Image: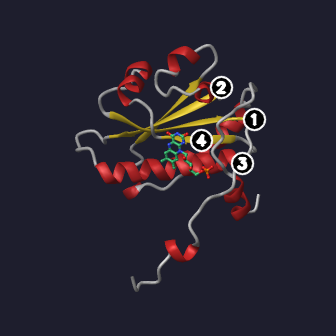
Amino acid sequence: MEFLELVKNRYSVRAYKSIPIEDDKLKYILEAARLAPTGANRQSFQLIVIHTADRGDELRLIYDKPWFVQAPVIICACATTIEGRPFREGGNYRDVAIVMDHLILAATNLGLGTCWIGAFDPTTARDILGLPEEARPIVFATIGYSNDQPGPKKRKPIKELIRYEHW
Ligand SMILES: Cc1cc2nc3c(=O)[nH]c(=O)nc-3n(C[C@H](O)[C@H](O)[C@H](O)COP(=O)(O)O)c2cc1C
């Protein structure tokens, strides 16, 4: 897909068909995430791939929306520390955001729907997914075939968002 078309085509999908994601598509998406740039090439993140089949009741404790577990796959993106080094709040979070944007746009390119989820319960996520202390869940994303419709893209006009040096 032409890149700007791809960006325009992505929208938050909050209803999914009960169709699994093909393995090769999932691999493509994860490869796009792997290739994302990170500060100093730290790559200190882990993506947890969660298949939702038969786990709906449990997974909804993490984020209580029916569509969260309607999606066949959920990704939990964690920031991790590099052994022996302190956690880098800003740096680690930026890295995870870039990785997830790669993942989400790659999914869009394959005709899959996604939704970022930041309003999840981190303590429950940690318990259910058995995350170790050094991994911080930052954001989730649902992935699956959309059963939703895009709404209007409500964005500020470019002149409110972009400045050329003089504030
Ligand atoms: C970091 C981040 C966190 C988000 N968290 C949630 C969420 O917890 N629940 C939800 O329904 N949508 C969530 N969204 C989706 C936004 O609401 C959505 O991207 C925004 O309203 C623009 O709509 P669009 O994605 O359809 O273009 C999140 C988006 C981002 C980027």
Image-based side of 78 in relation to 113, left or right: left
Q: Quick one: label 1 or label 2, which is nearer the N terminus?
A: 2
> Ligand 1: does it lie within 8 Å of the C-beta at label 3?
yes
**Label 2 residue SS:** helix
Circle 1 is placed at which residue position? 147
Q: Quick one: label 4 or label 2, which is nearer the N terminus?
A: 2
Q: How crowded is mark 1: few (under 14 residues within 10 Å), some or many (20 or more)?
A: few
Q: How crowded is mark 3: few (under 14 residues within 10 Å), some or many (20 or more)?
A: few
> Ligand 1: does it lie within 8 Å of the C-beta at label 4?
yes
Q: How far apart are marks 3 and 2 (CA)?
A: 18 Å
**Label 4 residue SS:** strand
Image-based side of 62 in relation to 102, left or right: left
Circle 3 is placed at which residue position? 150
Q: With respect to residue 147, does 19 lie above or below?
A: above
Mark 3 or 2, closer to the camera: 3
Q: With respect to residue 50, does 101 lie above or below?
A: below
Q: Distance between the residues labelled 3 and 4?
A: 12 Å
- Residue occupying image coordinates x 54% and y 77%: 159
The amino acid sitting under disc 1 is: Asn
- Residue occupying image coordinates x 64% and y 18%: 53
Q: How far apart are marks 1 and 2 (CA)?
A: 10 Å
Circle 2 is placed at which residue position? 70
In the foreground, 68 or 155: 155
